[in-house]
């Protein structure tokens, strides 16, 4: 009769899985992806994990909320391949992205302060689109370039109702007035914040209606909360990863 693997310090996939409410297949998948170091095999061919694997799993699961599955996997794979500097670079990139997202949120909040007077000055439905912005306006190419997106993206936003450019009566080109540019900027910032077009459309509608900014303010509050949660999750992930690095020696 063979000995229980746990009696010699070995852990089965189910032992790791049960602690975190995972499936044994998930444990095998994590190992194959490199998030866990390669396991030893028993004489019977079964995977035999150790306390080091348990520490790796704790670190990986702690990294997930702050960094996402792809980056967390890449971080752990780098550590398990003794490429700690690459892991630190990936972590730095995540922190830089979080900082960039915070700056984007601040930009949206700053834009919000100017929305009410701009929305109030917009024409009512049914007014002549040719006099929406007075003289001038901007075309799709320059606006797309200024936002760092493709003209096709602006056309998709138009189909979704996020922007409403008028057409030049002579050339037929789209012409974006000041309010359209504002809506495009706001849509771009909210898209960067992770919002879908169908979520943004009602916010833009409320902005246009003047005095309907509450949904946008609620969305920004939710966005701010998610950024804070990511920041805290990164701290937790860093602590677990440091513990794992110490275990690896």
Image (tube, rainbow, N blue to C red):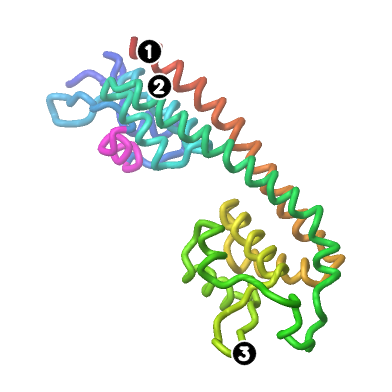
Task: Please give the name of the residue rendered at 47% of the width and 29% of the height, measured from the top-left corner.
Answer: 92
How far across and how far down the image is residue 190, in percent? 62, 56
How far across and how far down the image is residue 34, in percent? 28, 33
Q: Above or below — where is 26 with respect to 161?
A: above
Whether tag 1 and tag 2 are in contact, CB under 8 A, the answer is: yes
Residue at which label 1 appears = 247
Residue at which label 3 appears = 169
Q: Which of the two discs, 2 and 3, labels the residue nearer the N terminus?
A: 2
Range shown magenta: 25-34
Residue at which label 2 appears = 55
Q: Above or below — where is 196 with respect to 1?
A: below
How far across and how far down the image is residue 75, in percent? 38, 30
Quadrant (top left, top right, bottom left, bottom right) of the C terminus: top left
The answer for how far apart the CA atoms under marks 1 and 3 are is 71 Å
Task: Please give the name of the residue rendered at 27% of the width and 13% of the height, measured from the top-left corner.
Answer: 8
Q: Which of the two discs, 1 and 2, labels the residue nearer the N terminus?
A: 2
């Amino acid at each position: 009769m063979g000995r229980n693997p746990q009696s010699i310090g070995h852990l089965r996939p189910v032992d790791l899985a049960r602690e975190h409410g995972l499936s044994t297949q998930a444990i095998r998948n994590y190992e194959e992806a490199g998030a866990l170091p390669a396991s030893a095999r028993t004489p019977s061919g079964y995977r035999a994990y150790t306390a080091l694997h348990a520490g790796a799993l704790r670190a990986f699961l702690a990294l997930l909320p702050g960094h996402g599955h792809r980056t967390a996997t890449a971080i752990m794979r780098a550590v398990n391949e003794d490429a700690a500097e690459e892991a630190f670079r990936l972590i730095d990139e995540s922190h830089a992205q979080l900082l960039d997202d915070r700056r984007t949120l601040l930009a949206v909040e700053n834009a919000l302060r100017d929305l009410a007077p701009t929305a109030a000055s917009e024409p009512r439905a049914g007014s002549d689109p040719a006099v929406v912005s007075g003289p001038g306006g901007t075309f799709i190419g320059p606006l797309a370039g200024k936002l760092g997106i493709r003209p096709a993206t602006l056309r998709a936003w138009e189909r979704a109702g996020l922007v409403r450019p008028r057409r030049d009566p002579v050339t037929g080109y789209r012409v974006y007035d000041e309010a359209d540019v504002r809506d495009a900027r706001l849509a771009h910032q909210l898209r960067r914040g992770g919002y879908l077009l169908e979520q943004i459309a009602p916010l833009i509608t409320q902005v246009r209606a003047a005095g309907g900014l509450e949904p946008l303010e609620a969305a920004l509050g939710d966005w701010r909360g998610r950024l804070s949660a990511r920041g805290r999750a990164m701290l937790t992930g860093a602590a677990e990863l440091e513990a794992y690095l110490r275990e690896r020696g």
